[in-house]
Image (spheres, rainbow, N blue to C red):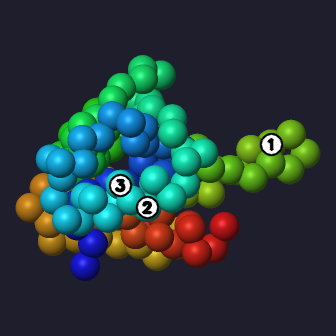
């Protein structure tokens, strides 16, 4: 089972964001966060800062990524998924439609149905993670 930090990292990578290792203080990290940082240290070409809504920001550790808790973070991911399209003869065909209801979230075109959650954001977060895992395997 992945931690929230690992899940949020997966979303950030899907969004095309990178982490700036120089802003992380290794002494303040947990063992799993150190492993996360080490993974990026092994890839020195990925030393960009995170960006959200065109604004560059720095984080001290991965727990500052709030995809799981903030619509301001999660809705741009939903927008990106819904903007994925194919084009034919100048016409765009959007491939994925996300349906968010009371305590569930669906992406019918690929059979993702997340229900029974305590809130809309929990269901949407789960559906987004399932989509990204599916997308990474099938792109």
* In this rendering, the label closer to the viewer, 2 or 1: 2
CA–CA distance in space, label 3 to label 1: 42 Å
> Residue pushed farthest bottom?
1
Quadrant location, the C terminus: bottom right
Q: Farthest residue toward the right? A: 89
Front residue of 46/92: it is 46
Please tell me which of labels 3 and 1 falls first in the chain. 3
Assess disc 2: are there few (<14), some (14-19) or many (≥20) residues with their C-alpha within 10 Å of its C-alpha: few
Residue under pointer 1: 91
Q: Given the current orientation, which residue lies at the most extreme top position?
A: 55
Q: Residue beneath label 2, please? A: 39
Q: Is residue 111 above or below residue 16?
A: below
How packed mark 3 is, by other alpha carbons closer than 10 Å (few <14, some 14-19, many 20 or more), is many
Q: Quadrant of the N terminus?
A: bottom left
- Name which of mark 2 and mark 1 comes first in the sequence: 2
Against 44, residue 73 (above or below) is: above
Q: Do callouts 3 and 2 mark residues in contact (Cβ within 8 Å)?
A: yes
| Percent of width and height locating residue 31 | 19, 65
Residue 137 is at least partly visible in this image: yes
Query: In the image, is 92 to the left or to the right of 84?
Result: right
Instruction: Rate crowding at label 1 as few (under 14), some (14 to 19) or many (20 or more) other CA atoms within 10 Å.
Output: few
Identify the element where label 2 is drawn: helix
Mark number displayed over residue 1: none
Q: Residue 68's spot in the image, x, y percent? A: 23, 51
Q: Nearer the viewer, mark 3 or mark 1?
A: 3
Q: Within the image, what quadrant is residue 32 found in?
A: bottom left
Secondary element under disc 3, as helix, strand or loop, is: helix
The image shows residue 76 at horizontal and vertical percentages of 42, 38
In this rendering, does residue 101 appear at all? no
Who's the residue at 40% across and 42% down the image?
21
* Residue labelled with disc 3: 37
């Amino acid at each position: 089972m992945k931690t929230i930090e690992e899940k949020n990292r997966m979303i950030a990578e899907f969004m095309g964001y990178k982490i700036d290792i120089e802003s992380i203080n290794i002494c303040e990290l947990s063992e799993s966060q150190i492993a996360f940082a080490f993974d990026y240290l092994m890839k020195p070409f990925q030393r960009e800062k995170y960006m959200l809504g065109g604004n560059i920001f720095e984080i001290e550790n991965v727990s500052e990524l709030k995809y799981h808790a903030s619509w301001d973070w999660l809705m741009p991911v939903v927008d990106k998924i819904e903007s994925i399209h194919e084009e034919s003869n100048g016409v765009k065909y959007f491939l994925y439609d996300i349906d968010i209801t009371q305590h569930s979230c669906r992406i019918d075109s690929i059979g993702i149905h997340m229900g029974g959650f305590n809130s809309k954001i929990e269901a949407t977060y789960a559906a987004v993670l399932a989509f990204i895992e599916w997308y990474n395997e099938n792109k």
